Protein backbone atom coordinates (compact mmCIF):
# COMPACT_ATOMS: atom_id res chain seq x y z
CA UNK A 1 0.00 0.00 0.00
CA UNK A 2 2.75 2.60 0.70
CA UNK A 3 3.95 2.15 -2.91
CA UNK A 4 0.58 3.44 -4.08
CA UNK A 5 1.43 6.88 -2.70
CA UNK A 6 4.94 6.90 -4.10
CA UNK A 7 5.53 8.89 -7.27
CA UNK A 8 7.16 7.10 -10.18
CA UNK A 9 9.01 10.36 -10.88
CA UNK A 10 11.15 10.16 -7.74
CA UNK A 11 14.25 9.66 -9.87
CA UNK A 12 13.15 12.26 -12.42
CA UNK A 13 11.32 12.12 -15.74
CA UNK A 14 12.59 9.51 -18.15
CA UNK A 15 11.32 8.40 -21.54
CA UNK A 16 10.13 5.13 -20.02
CA UNK A 17 8.19 6.91 -17.28
CA UNK A 18 6.64 9.34 -19.74
CA UNK A 19 5.31 6.57 -21.98
CA UNK A 20 4.06 4.66 -18.93
CA UNK A 21 2.17 7.70 -17.64
CA UNK A 22 0.82 8.52 -21.10
CA UNK A 23 -0.47 4.97 -21.60
CA UNK A 24 -2.16 5.13 -18.20
CA UNK A 25 -3.66 8.51 -19.11
CA UNK A 26 -5.21 7.12 -22.30
CA UNK A 27 -6.60 4.08 -20.49
CA UNK A 28 -8.07 6.21 -17.69
CA UNK A 29 -9.49 8.63 -20.24
CA UNK A 30 -11.19 5.78 -22.10
CA UNK A 31 -12.70 4.56 -18.82
CA UNK A 32 -14.00 8.04 -17.97
CA UNK A 33 -15.47 8.41 -21.47
CA UNK A 34 -17.25 5.06 -21.13
CA UNK A 35 -18.73 6.08 -17.78
CA UNK A 36 -19.79 9.51 -19.07
CA UNK A 37 -21.49 8.02 -22.13
CA UNK A 38 -23.15 5.11 -20.33
CA UNK A 39 -26.92 5.18 -20.95
CA UNK A 40 -26.89 8.86 -21.88
CA UNK A 41 -26.67 10.94 -25.02
CA UNK A 42 -23.14 12.25 -25.51
CA UNK A 43 -21.50 13.52 -28.66
CA UNK A 44 -18.55 11.74 -30.21
CA UNK A 45 -16.48 14.91 -29.88
CA UNK A 46 -17.15 15.14 -26.15
CA UNK A 47 -16.23 11.50 -25.50
CA UNK A 48 -13.09 11.87 -27.62
CA UNK A 49 -12.11 14.92 -25.57
CA UNK A 50 -12.51 12.94 -22.34
CA UNK A 51 -10.17 10.23 -23.68
CA UNK A 52 -7.48 12.74 -24.70
CA UNK A 53 -7.80 15.24 -21.85
CA UNK A 54 -5.80 13.29 -19.19
CA UNK A 55 -2.90 12.83 -21.60
CA UNK A 56 -2.95 16.50 -22.61
CA UNK A 57 -3.08 17.75 -19.01
CA UNK A 58 -0.36 15.32 -17.95
CA UNK A 59 1.98 16.41 -20.76
CA UNK A 60 1.33 20.13 -20.19
CA UNK A 61 2.01 19.93 -16.46
CA UNK A 62 5.16 17.88 -17.01
CA UNK A 63 6.48 20.45 -19.45
CA UNK A 64 5.50 23.42 -17.24
CA UNK A 65 6.91 21.95 -14.02
CA UNK A 66 9.36 24.44 -12.48
CA UNK A 67 8.96 27.09 -15.19
CA UNK A 68 6.93 30.06 -13.89
CA UNK A 69 6.80 31.90 -17.20
CA UNK A 70 5.49 28.91 -19.11
CA UNK A 71 2.98 28.25 -16.32
CA UNK A 72 1.51 31.76 -16.63
CA UNK A 73 1.26 31.37 -20.41
CA UNK A 74 -0.54 28.04 -20.08
CA UNK A 75 -2.93 29.54 -17.51
CA UNK A 76 -3.84 32.27 -19.99
CA UNK A 77 -4.43 29.71 -22.75
CA UNK A 78 -6.73 27.65 -20.51
CA UNK A 79 -8.65 30.83 -19.60
CA UNK A 80 -9.33 31.50 -23.28
CA UNK A 81 -10.62 27.95 -23.73
CA UNK A 82 -12.90 28.37 -20.69
CA UNK A 83 -14.58 31.52 -21.99
CA UNK A 84 -15.15 29.97 -25.40
CA UNK A 85 -16.96 26.99 -23.87
CA UNK A 86 -20.71 26.70 -23.29
CA UNK A 87 -22.16 25.57 -19.97
CA UNK A 88 -22.63 21.84 -19.72
CA UNK A 89 -24.73 19.47 -17.68
CA UNK A 90 -23.61 18.39 -14.23
CA UNK A 91 -22.60 14.94 -15.47
CA UNK A 92 -20.44 16.45 -18.23
CA UNK A 93 -18.74 18.89 -15.85
CA UNK A 94 -17.99 16.03 -13.44
CA UNK A 95 -16.47 13.95 -16.24
CA UNK A 96 -14.26 16.84 -17.36
CA UNK A 97 -13.03 17.46 -13.81
CA UNK A 98 -12.35 13.74 -13.39
CA UNK A 99 -10.28 13.66 -16.58
CA UNK A 100 -8.30 16.71 -15.46
CA UNK A 101 -7.76 15.22 -11.99
CA UNK A 102 -6.40 12.02 -13.50
CA UNK A 103 -4.08 14.03 -15.72
CA UNK A 104 -2.79 16.08 -12.79
CA UNK A 105 -2.21 12.98 -10.66
CA UNK A 106 -0.27 11.34 -13.48
CA UNK A 107 1.77 14.50 -14.05
CA UNK A 108 2.84 14.24 -10.41
CA UNK A 109 3.80 10.60 -10.99
CA UNK A 110 1.05 9.09 -8.83
CA UNK A 111 0.18 6.30 -11.24
CA UNK A 112 -1.81 4.09 -8.88
CA UNK A 113 -3.70 7.02 -7.35
CA UNK A 114 -4.80 8.15 -10.82
CA UNK A 115 -5.95 4.65 -11.78
CA UNK A 116 -7.75 4.18 -8.46
CA UNK A 117 -9.58 7.52 -8.76
CA UNK A 118 -10.53 6.88 -12.40
CA UNK A 119 -11.95 3.42 -11.66
CA UNK A 120 -13.75 4.42 -8.45
CA UNK A 121 -15.39 7.59 -9.72
CA UNK A 122 -16.28 6.03 -13.10
CA UNK A 123 -18.01 3.13 -11.34
CA UNK A 124 -19.93 5.60 -9.17
CA UNK A 125 -20.97 7.59 -12.26
CA UNK A 126 -22.43 4.40 -13.73
CA UNK A 127 -24.02 3.00 -10.57
CA UNK A 128 -25.45 6.07 -8.79
CA UNK A 129 -28.02 6.92 -11.54
CA UNK A 130 -29.43 3.40 -11.10
CA UNK A 131 -30.28 3.99 -7.45
CA UNK A 132 -33.94 4.80 -6.69
CA UNK A 133 -33.47 8.53 -6.17
CA UNK A 134 -36.40 10.81 -6.83
CA UNK A 135 -36.67 11.13 -10.58
CA UNK A 136 -37.11 14.45 -12.33
CA UNK A 137 -40.80 14.65 -13.19
CA UNK A 138 -40.75 17.93 -15.10
CA UNK A 139 -42.64 17.99 -18.38
CA UNK A 140 -43.45 20.65 -20.95
CA UNK A 141 -47.10 21.33 -21.66
CA UNK A 142 -48.15 23.44 -24.65
CA UNK A 143 -51.76 24.57 -24.97
CA UNK A 144 -53.32 26.50 -27.83
CA UNK A 145 -56.22 28.74 -26.78
CA UNK A 146 -58.50 31.19 -28.64
CA UNK A 147 -57.89 34.92 -28.15
CA UNK A 148 -61.24 35.24 -26.39
CA UNK A 149 -60.12 33.00 -23.49
CA UNK A 150 -58.64 34.70 -20.41
CA UNK A 151 -55.82 32.20 -20.02
CA UNK A 152 -54.12 33.64 -16.93
CA UNK A 153 -56.29 31.58 -14.55
CA UNK A 154 -58.36 29.49 -16.98
CA UNK A 155 -56.64 26.21 -16.08
CA UNK A 156 -55.70 26.76 -12.43
CA UNK A 157 -58.25 24.31 -11.03
CA UNK A 158 -57.11 21.59 -13.45
CA UNK A 159 -53.46 22.15 -12.59
CA UNK A 160 -54.24 22.05 -8.87
CA UNK A 161 -55.93 18.71 -9.41
CA UNK A 162 -53.29 16.96 -11.52
CA UNK A 163 -49.93 18.70 -11.01
CA UNK A 164 -47.54 19.12 -8.09
CA UNK A 165 -46.07 22.29 -9.58
CA UNK A 166 -46.81 24.34 -12.68
CA UNK A 167 -45.40 27.52 -14.18
CA UNK A 168 -46.22 29.51 -17.30
CA UNK A 169 -42.93 29.99 -19.16
CA UNK A 170 -43.96 31.74 -22.36
CA UNK A 171 -46.92 33.03 -24.37
CA UNK A 172 -46.87 33.28 -28.16
CA UNK A 173 -49.49 34.53 -30.62
CA UNK A 174 -50.36 32.53 -33.74
CA UNK A 175 -52.70 32.63 -36.73
CA UNK A 176 -52.69 36.44 -37.09
CA UNK A 177 -53.25 36.88 -33.37
CA UNK A 178 -56.44 34.82 -33.23
CA UNK A 179 -54.73 32.12 -31.16
CA UNK A 180 -52.36 32.04 -28.21
CA UNK A 181 -49.81 29.28 -27.62
CA UNK A 182 -49.08 28.78 -23.91
CA UNK A 183 -45.93 27.03 -22.76
CA UNK A 184 -46.00 25.53 -19.24
CA UNK A 185 -43.49 23.55 -17.20
CA UNK A 186 -45.30 21.09 -14.94
CA UNK A 187 -44.67 18.18 -12.61
CA UNK A 188 -47.43 15.60 -12.57
CA UNK A 189 -48.65 14.14 -9.29
CA UNK A 190 -49.25 10.88 -11.15
CA UNK A 191 -48.21 10.44 -14.77
CA UNK A 192 -50.95 7.88 -15.31
CA UNK A 193 -53.49 10.71 -15.09
CA UNK A 194 -52.02 12.60 -18.07
CA UNK A 195 -54.88 11.58 -20.39
CA UNK A 196 -57.54 12.71 -17.91
CA UNK A 197 -55.81 16.07 -17.52
CA UNK A 198 -55.52 16.57 -21.28
CA UNK A 199 -59.21 15.67 -21.74
CA UNK A 200 -60.22 18.34 -19.22
CA UNK A 201 -57.90 20.87 -20.84
CA UNK A 202 -59.45 20.14 -24.24
CA UNK A 203 -62.89 20.96 -22.87
CA UNK A 204 -61.53 24.27 -21.58
CA UNK A 205 -59.54 25.40 -24.66
CA UNK A 206 -62.13 24.58 -27.31
CA UNK A 207 -60.50 21.29 -28.37
CA UNK A 208 -57.51 23.09 -29.89
CA UNK A 209 -54.01 21.62 -30.02
CA UNK A 210 -52.37 20.37 -26.79
CA UNK A 211 -48.97 18.69 -26.46
CA UNK A 212 -47.21 17.13 -23.47
CA UNK A 213 -43.56 16.04 -23.59
CA UNK A 214 -40.50 15.54 -21.44
CA UNK A 215 -38.77 18.75 -20.40
CA UNK A 216 -35.32 19.50 -21.73
CA UNK A 217 -32.43 18.61 -19.43
CA UNK A 218 -31.34 22.17 -18.79
CA UNK A 219 -32.12 21.65 -15.11
CA UNK A 220 -28.80 19.80 -14.78
CA UNK A 221 -26.69 22.67 -16.08
CA UNK A 222 -24.09 24.20 -13.80
Image (spheres, rainbow, N blue to C red):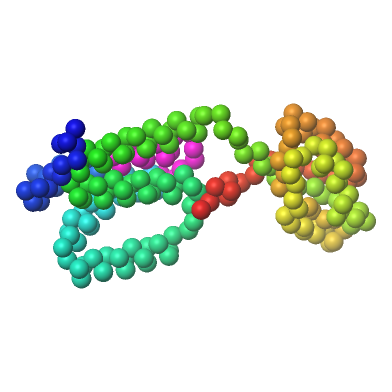
The quadrant where residue 124 appears: top left
Q: Position of residue 35 (x, y in %)?
A: 40, 36
- As drawn, is 167 to the left or to the right of 49? right
Q: Is residue 172 magenta?
A: no
Residue 92 vertical placement versus 173 (above, below): above
The residue drawn where x is 35% and y is 40% is 32
Residue extending furthest front? Answer: 2
Is residue 23 among what the camera can see? no
Residue 98 pos. (x, y %): 35, 45
Question: 178 or 22, which is in the foreground?
Answer: 22
Q: Is residue 204 above or below residue 132?
A: below
Please state the extent of the stretch shown in magenta in the rendering.
28-44
Q: Residue at x 64, y 44 (%)?
A: 215
Say if the magenta span includes residue 34. Answer: yes
Q: Position of residue 183 (x, y in %)?
A: 74, 51
Which residue is rendered at x = 91% and y = 40% of the image?
203
**Image height check: is 146 above or below 82?**
above
Q: Is residue 212 left or right of residue 74?
A: right
Q: Nearer the viewer, residue 208 or 204?
A: 204
Does residue 180 appear to the left or right of 132 in the view shown? Answer: right
Q: Quadrant of the N terminus?
A: top left
On the image, which quarter does residue 140 sit in? top right
Res. 191 in view: yes
Give x and y (percent) for residue 105.
24, 47
Amino acid sequence: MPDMLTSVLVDGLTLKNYFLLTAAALLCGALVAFAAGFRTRASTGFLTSLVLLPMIVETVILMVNGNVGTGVAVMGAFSLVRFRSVAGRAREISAIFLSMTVGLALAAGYLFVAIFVAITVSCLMVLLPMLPFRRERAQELRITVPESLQFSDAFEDIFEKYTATHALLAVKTANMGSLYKLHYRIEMKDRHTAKSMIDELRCRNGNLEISLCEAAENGEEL
